[in-house]
Every structure is written in structure tokens, then in C-alpha cells.
Amino acid sequence: MRKKSWPTHSILVLAIVATWIKTYIVYHTSFDMKIENIMQQVILFINPLSFILFIYGISLFFKNPKVKNRYIVIVSFILSAVLYANAVFYRFFTDFITLPVLFQTSNFGDLGTSAAESIYWSDIFYFTDVAIIIIALKWLKIGETTSVIKPAVRRAYFVLTAAILFLNLGLSEIERPQLLTRSFDREMLVKNIGSYNYHLYDLYIQSKSHAQRALADGSELVEVNNYVRSNQAEPNEEMFGVAKGRNLIVISMESLQNFVINNDMNGHEVTPFLNSLTQDKDTYYFSNFYHQTGLGKTSDSEFLVENSLYPLGGGAVFFTHSGNKFHSMSESLNEQGYFTNVMHPNNKSFWNRDMMYQALSIQKYYDVNSYVVNEGDAVNWGMKDIPFFEQSVSLMKEMPQPFYSRLITLTNHYPFDLDEEDQLIPPYDSNSRTLNKYFQSVRYMDEALKTLFDDLKEQGLYDNSIIVMYGDHYGISENHNKAMSQYLGKEITPYESAKLQRVPFFIHIPNSGKGEEITETAGQIDIRPTILHLLGVETAKDMQLGADVFSNEHEEFVIFRNGGFVTDKLVFANNACYDNATGEEIDIESCQPYIDRTTQELGYSDQIINGDLLRFYDLKTGNLLIDQAEKKNP
């Protein structure tokens, strides 16, 4: 009886299907990726296919059947090895491998130990497709041909591959807008574009960053350094060191805009606790303070606070430049004997924090695994603020003092959903469900902040601390201008939209008797020098673009990442110049000098980040390392 002859490309089809199905099974069995709806399940199912079709499809260009089959086996083994390496890495780190991880030699010891402890006999499953292909080659009779497949057929194959890729990207963009431009979470990338495409994207991001870094020689820092020194503001003698030696507690208030402060919603006070702080004798409240974030949102605000540099315009610095050298606020406080840490009940890889915090010299990251998330404690993007604060204060109690703890809240995050028992005020009544829920979510966060203060007092941490709170970015976007117009009772023009970028900024120094409302225009880039000066830490040699808000030399000039700006007299928004007092549009020439400075300052910040220029700067001496090299080799 004659053995059945299978079609010529049976091995190719078998390899594609076997690797595709195996990858999908691995997604569900090896990675703890939360699937929230049918759309995400569909995306997860199709996202490996485009890359698998492409990489295996290269075999269609081979004329020799043996070479073609050998190529398919090798590719299947490599793909299996990549997937398996991620699975083993994930078992220990709950994360996906990145190029920076592979190139940071200090991690090799941990990786080797972790890998050895995370390998099981059952892991042979990850190479199931390789075994299937080899068995098929041995036992199936395949119709062979020595001619290359017709160009038209090959073209149709790759058109199909491209179509599947664009379908995948289109569905991902619907499910997670700005996925590739924001690049905020490796798990999110794998869940949407697939593990294989994720590694290609990671390669692209890291290659781009390294190319810009490789071309930098430090000479670019000369002009930047001159600019920083010429715009430096001397600290206020009366305020310098008023909180010296105290614990520093910094609260990032998620999505909190200033328009809710000292305001009500249909007769309901939205932020009663924060309102009371605006009148507190120990609190400075800045009512004309602006966020300066870009696509990186919360991570951008963290970057601003730690470095007093602007975020990038086309992505999140936390993701693209986590391998850079930075001179962070944490690094300065480490040298002052502080225990520096961040507390945030979310996955450690979100916004690439686990990697970036190392670059920022933060000693400890209390991620979601540091907390007990009981039933009913989770909402939106993570743990509710009240239990988060309660457990955080308990953790602070055990910390060596003085400590610097930066707490990142989560509850007041889009889409601002709350459990019924946490809805302390009714919703608003506009045409925007987002704005309607926002007031309720803000009210809950305000209550959580009151709880935090109470717990700090109860645990004996309050009196010897300084508490700094800032809104990290806007919560209500321009998409809700109609509803905002209803609430504010006026049209939302570009001028008004720029003014809505104000976020609350509080500096609370218990028992100091120092407090008032400050109306001077300032921004997040000013937080670092302000805090360090209050703690008595000099910053005269630091490479920072912000200035101490208490300094008599502080300039009222806030730059937005999109090129807009606000001064005490002018607002530049949507390519139009406005009088800050009246909101009336005026001649663009009035804004031109500040437009030029905005472009210059953003450019200098981008140069520092993209070229990793701080590696050429000695923070202790304030000297450029290229100058020192020239002195040694005249």
C-alpha cells in the first residue's frame, strides 16, 4: 500500500499552527496576564500570528527542500527558546525580559540563580512544536519540489501577514490607545502585540536610545551647563533648612486638578480636607501650580520630581531611558542618610518602575507584593487609597529614620469607578460620565488623605515629618470640554484649557507656624530644588532646570511639554498668545521671546536625556568630566 504524499508546504503550515497554538497556551499557563473582556482575548489569540507567519515565511525563498526544512526547525527552536526564557524569567520576577536586563551585568548572578531554581522537567512542553516538526519530517512523506514558489503566491502570503499585523495593531489601539507611543507596561505590550513583536519593539527602542547615546561625547553639556548656571536661583535664607532632619513624605495625588479645590459640586464639598489645608497655619498651598507631564503621565511627574528635567515629548522616559545616569533627589537624600523608597500598590513593571527606580538610586520599592489586598480593597488600577495609606504608615513605622517615602495613589484614576460604599457624594449631572464620576472619586481620595494624616499622628510619625502633596497630571481631558463648560459656567477656550492644567501643590510642615496661600506661577519641575532646600541640602552644583519656589529669584515661567507655557502675564496655548489677566488673545509677538526660551529649554532637557549627558558631569565638584579629561591630556 502506497504511503500518502502530503502537500509540499505541509511542514510550513504545521510549524505555523503548532507554534501559534503553543504560544497561546503558554500565554495562559505561564504568564499571569489579566484578560478583562472578549476583545482582549481575541487580541491575545491573534497577536503571535503575524510574526510567526513572517519568520517562517522566509523559508518560501529557499529552493532546496532540505535547507528549507532545516531553517523551519531552527526557527521553531529559537522561538521556543525565547518563549521559554521569558517563562522562566517570569516565574521569579513576574516580568518579561528586556535588553537592559540582559546588558546589566550586575543582574547576571541573580538571573542565573533564579533560572536554575525555576527549571522543571515539565518544561519540555515549551519545545512541543519543535518535536512535532521533527517527527513530521521523519514520518510524513512530503511532496518535494526544487523550484522556488511563484512570486505571486509568495506576495499574497506576505500581504496576508501584513494584514494580520495591521488588524492586530488596530484592535490594540482600540483597546489601549497610544500603546506604542506611551510604551508604559511590558505586560500590556505583550498582551497586545505579542511576545515576539514585543522583543522587536524593545530592540527598536533600545537601539534608538543607544545610538543617540553613542554619538554624544559630552561637548553638548557645555552649552547646557552655561544655561543652567545663568538661570540658577539662590535659596531663600529664611526657608532654607526649616525641615532639616525630618522625614520626607511625598504624595502623588492621581489625576487631581486644582479646579476642585475650595469648590463644590451641586452643593457638595468635593475636597473638605484639602480645603482645610489651604487655611492651615502649617501649610503652604500653591494655587497657580501646573503639571508639566507628557505621554508618560504619572511616570513623567515622578521623573520631574526626582530630576527637575522635562519628560520626553514622544514617549515615557521611564521606559526609553532607564539605563541612563541620573542625579535624582533620591541620590542626594541617600547621601544625607535618608532611607529612600517608593510605595505604590501596583505591578512593579508598570511604567518600567522596577528598572527606573534603580537608575534613580531609590533604595526600596514597595510594590503590590508589599501589601495585603483583601477582598473589596481593589478598584480601577489597583489598591484603594484608604487601605493603601493605612498599610503604608505601618510600613513607615518600621523604616529607619529619617526616610523619604514617595506614595503614589491609585483610586482617582480613569475611569473613576468606585464601589457604592465609597461614593461619599452623588455624581455630577453633565453629559460626561467621566466628569460625573470624577467628583466622587476625588472626594474619596480627599477622605483617604485625611486618614493618612490621622494615621501618621497615631503612629508618632507626624511631628517629625514634612508632607508634600502634588497633583500628578490632569484627570479631565479636553474631550470633556462641554461638560467642563457646564460646571465652570464658561466656554473652554485654549486659554482656559491651559489654565485647567493647574494641579494642587501643598507643603505641610507640622508645628512650624509657616503657611499661606502662594499665588506665584510655578510647576512640577520646581519641586526637587524646593524640597531639597527645605531639608537644608544645597543644589548649587546640580544639573536641574527648575528653581526653588521660595527663592526671591524664582521666575514665574512654566513650560508645558507640548511647547506651550504660562507666565504671570502671558499664556501661550494652541499656537496663540493670551493675556493671562483677561484671557484675551493678543499679538503673537508678545509671546515670542518666551516661545524661543521654551524651545531652547526643552531642547536642552532632551539633549541631557537622549545623550545620557549626566555621565559626563561630576555632581560633587560641579565640573564637566570632559574638562577634567582635557586638563589631564592637554
Image (cartoon, rainbow, N blue to C red):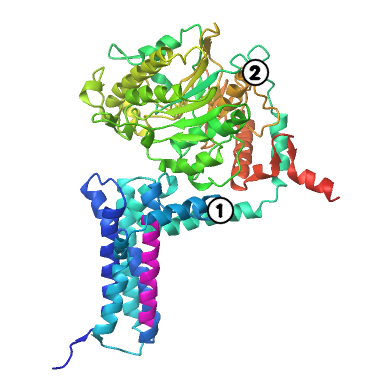
Up the image or down, 424 lies above or below 167; here it is above
Quarter of the rendering occupied by the N terminus: bottom left
Say which amino acid is labelled 1. Answer: Thr
Number of marks drawn: 2
Which of the 4 image quarters holds residue 493? top left
Q: Residue furthest right?
A: 634
Q: Position of residue 416 (x, y in %)?
A: 30, 29
Determine which residue is flagged by label 2.
551
State how far apart marks 1 and 2 are (Cα): 43 Å
Q: Position of residue 496 (x, y in %)?
A: 44, 25
Up the image or down, 252 lies above or below 189; here it is above
Mark with earlier residue (1, 2): 1
Please say whether residue 83 is one of the residues in the magenta stretch: yes
Residue beneath the point at 27% across and 59% down:
24
Q: Position of residue 478 (x, y in %)?
A: 38, 32
Determine which residue is flagged by label 1.
105
Residue beneath the point at 62% across and 46% down:
612
- Tell me which segment is drawn in magenta: 68-87
Residue beneath the point at 43% across and 58% down:
199
Which of the 4 image quarters holds residue 603? top right
Say few, some or many: other residues with alpha carbon within 10 Å of mark 2 (under 14 / 14 to 19 / 20 or more): some
> Label 1's element?
helix
